[in-house]
Image (cartoon, helix red, strand yellow):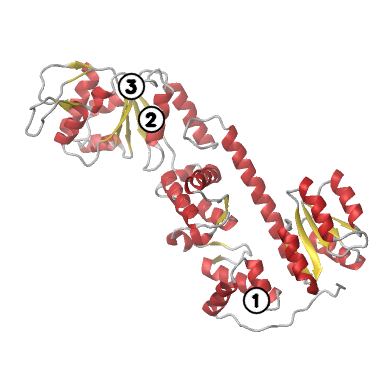
Amino acid sequence: MRLAVVDDEVTVAKRLKRALSNEGFDVETFLNGEDFLTRQKTHPFQIAFIDLRLPDMDGLDILSQLKPAHDDLEAIIITGYGSIETAIEAIKMGAYHYLTKPFRLDEVRLLAKGAREKIQLRKENQRLRKALNQQETLKGFIGNSQVMLEVFETIRKIAPINCNVLIQGETGTGKELAARSIHMLSPRSKRPFVSFNCGGFTEELIANELFGHEKGAYTGATATKIGLLESADGGTVFLDEISEMPLSMQVKLLRVIQEKRILRVGSTKPIDLDIRIIAATNKDLKQAICEGSFRNDLYYRLNVVSLSLPRLTERRDDIPLLISHFINKYSRSFGKNTKRVSPRVLDILMNYEFPGNVRELENIIQRAVALEEGETIRVKDLPSDLQRLEFKSLDGEGLLSLEELEKQHIEKVLKKTGYNKSLTSKILNLPRTTLWRKMRKYGLPNKEKETRTVNTRS
């Protein structure tokens, strides 16, 4: 990443170049603003440290010329201690942050790394948005991983074929979404798609819902009712949790598939039926057959073609894409301005096991967007069990809790600012009252300390 240092003090420029080059930046130095602006036009920089007082122009003048044409450049204004108000004005104009003379090189490195992280995060979000706009997958499905591309290809192949389909996958993997995609890509797309969950109902209720009943078929049947199977004539019926269907109802469903006819409850007149059945289960039906809870003949009638949906942990490459999709979805829905997740949140989500799969990820992001007032979802917006997750610290010091990481980070920033509470709260993006509360919570010292500085003139 290209970085410019614009400062008329040769010694300062050289020290900054040496320190930042060691952090992996491609650094060029300039002693005046005009030379920097000329170079920026032909070989743009992504990050620039700009002194507020230069021989030929003011740092704010440079910033005002940069931003219209190079809005993606992150500028850090270098200022004397007595010019804090001017530095804040620079931030309002679009600068990433400011650096007060005299400063420590650790502080310089911290700002440069923060700017680089912001640029990388912005590029990643742009890539994800582009992928969302350009991906030619199935309506409602999000994914570019190899395993999902294979799922999409299978759906496209089986959709035009007029056969029954069995979809297998854990809860939250998108079984109904797959069934709807098959229906929408099939010749039956103009006809109804009817969904029914077979779990948790008695045989009588299932029969009544699927087959309907005639007037007077039983007490309370005051009018004829059309069943779901009949209402889907010409279209598709999606039977979710098919493994939960009682054995007696499995016999009746098998007869419907074989004869392509139904009988309403209380009727003796068969009704011809043209439907495609897509069944789904999160259980092993072959095991259910061995246990005697599912009919072997019905299994083979339903499993003409099978489709297996992967767990979210089997398609981790899709997690950032799904996060971006859900953020856009719920930001619009809630009227929020949420745009991204922080790197720490992404790290947690990329390493989480997701027992509830995509549905659980969607619920996590929906909750976070509802809670977050800013543009970035942070760790505090996650459910408490995710907040307690431990992950490897950036310093490679082993596994630390989020609370311990927060304590160490606050202490580190306090030391770098000489325990300047105003500057610390600004760097941490925390209200001063919140900073005081956290300092008391973690037992951090509350006093000003002298720090070793790089001697420069203001």
Q: Is residue 443 visible in the rendered structure shown here?
A: yes
Local crowd size for mark 1, using a 10 Å CA cut-off: few (<14), some (14–19), many (≥20): some
Choose mark 2 or mark 3, whichever is in front. 3
Q: Quadrant of residue 458?
A: bottom right
Q: Nearer the viewer, residue 402 or 134?
A: 134
Q: Amino acid at mark 1?
A: Lys
Q: Are marks 2 and 3 in contact (CB under 8 Å)?
A: no
Residue holding disc 3:
235
Q: Position of residue 81 (x, y in %)?
A: 79, 74
Q: Is residue 439 left or right of residue 90?
A: left
Q: Is residue 233 above or below residue 353?
A: above
Choose mark 1 or mark 3, whichever is in front. 1
- Give the residue at x 71% y 55%: 116
* SS under mark 2: helix
- Give the residue at x 36% y 43%: 171
In three-dimensional space, the C-alpha distance between marks 2 and 1, rounded to whole angstroms, equals: 57 Å
* SS under mark 3: loop
Q: Is residue 280 above or below residue 190?
A: below
Q: Is residue 163 left or right of residue 51?
A: left
Q: Is residue 297 left or right of residue 353?
A: left
Q: Amino acid at mark 2?
A: Ala
* SS under mark 1: helix
Q: Nearer the viewer, residue 272 or 54?
A: 54
Choose mark 2 or mark 1, whichever is in front. 1
Q: Is residue 82 above or below residue 344?
A: below
Residue holding disc 2:
179
Q: Position of residue 139 (x, y in %)?
A: 48, 31
Q: Quadrant of residue 272?
A: top left
Residue holding disc 1:
421
In three-dimensional space, the C-alpha distance between marks 1 and 3, rounded to whole angstroms, equals: 67 Å
Between discs 2 and 3, the one toward the N terminus: 2
